[in-house]
Image (cartoon, rainbow, N blue to C red):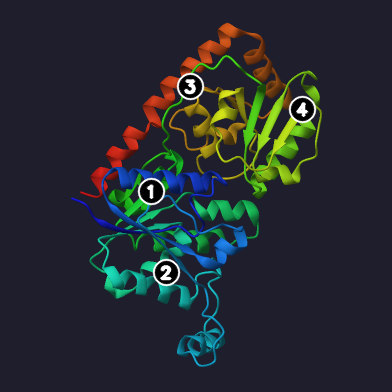
Amino acid sequence: MSKKILFFFPENPFSNRAGNVTRAKTTLTILKKLGHRIDLVGVKDIYSEQKDSATFDPAIVDNLFLIRQKPLKNKASLDYWEHKLSKMYQKPNENNVALTAFVKKEFINLFLAKKYDVVVINYEFWTGLIEHAAMKNTLKIVDTHDWITLNEFYKNKKLDIGKRFSEEINNLSKFDRIITISEDEHLVFKRFLEHKVINIPPSFSSHFNNHSDKKYDLIFVGSENYFNIQSMQWFFKNVYPLLPENINIIIIGRICKHLEKKKNVTLIEFAESLEQYYHQSRIAICPMLEGTGIKIKVIEALSYGLPVVGTERAVDGFSSKVSNGCLINNSPEVFRDHLLSLLQNETYYTKIKHEVKVYFNDHFSEEKAVEKWKNILI
């Protein structure tokens, strides 16, 4: 039976900017394929910060609403004075300054206008949006995307881990269903929240076409977040100098703003579609040093049949760390050797490509994700 779904994601999921955005768009696509009516909610201030347009695909989303963190400056407005007074006696949310009393009010007003059957919230730190009594009998789902406590710890080693993790578990407990995308995080949250936790790994349609025209040897796709910047700085300092000069590398995404132009390295800050670049590449790299959760960029590369060479963090969240199409090592020299083995030995390359296809079909196919969402929304 078709349900009315209110789907909150603060950024524009149609911006093709990063893995988290791709994840949100994929989920929306699955929900629409299941026949549900979907209203998308974003935060106007965050759209502005990211320079996102208010465009969306009407084949996936029925309506888009943008809510504001604070009311417009209008001294004749009751909302304006309520917001001004609230700032005097309410401390900002220390885990999410964008979660203001006004943004909560805007969200509940949207909910009350249509009385949705399901509310989907992306990220634990937006839990405050579903705490209104009017949602008591509504199916409330959170897509965690990440283990937020660990993610924040990587960025701030002075973080009070016990306090933050307690808050994270408490927030997640307010939902009826908790979606994880990583097997590692699924095991952690399941210990505390039991049957509420469901693991739905990232999913893609497969594109295993055997394109013979390979323009690039290596491809990396990434946004300009801290972990991507750190990883590519490590790669260019430690691995790149060890590679033969004739190896062609393409890097796509806002990460390019933080990289210097180098010989045989193509930098593309934005691409409307990644398909042609994946088809033109032989190997994907993921030299992540820190960060949590499953790496969307790795799953996407596997969906195109590309072997992946990475550090240990590249396969975080995988149910198996071997025979999955990924060659993993933190040593720059071994990283280089993995790359050269794939580039110089066609038989070995074909063997690893076969592992890619088998592991992808067993764990990340769109069909498996559709079935899990179907069972949740029955």
- Asked if the residue under mark 1 is in contact with the one under mark 3, i.e. CB atoms within 8 Å, the reply is no
Amino acid carrying mark 3 in the image: Val
- Asked if the residue under mark 2 is in contact with the one under mark 3, i.e. CB atoms within 8 Å, the reply is no
Q: Is residue 153 above or below residue 233?
A: below
Q: Secondary structure at mark 1?
A: helix
Amino acid carrying mark 4 in the image: Tyr
Name the residue beneath numbered marker 4. 240
Q: Secondary structure at mark 4?
A: helix
Residue 199 lies left or right of residue 22; in this view the side is left
Q: Secondary structure at mark 2?
A: helix
**Percent coordinates x, y for residue 138 in the rendering:** 25, 64
Per the rendering, the mark at residue 28 is 1
The residues tagged by marks 4 and 3 sit, at their Cα atoms, a distance apart of 25 Å
Name the residue beneath numbered marker 2. 128
The residues tagged by marks 3 and 1 sit, at their Cα atoms, a distance apart of 26 Å
Per the rendering, the mark at residue 356 is 3
Mark 3 / mark 1, whichever is N-terminal: 1
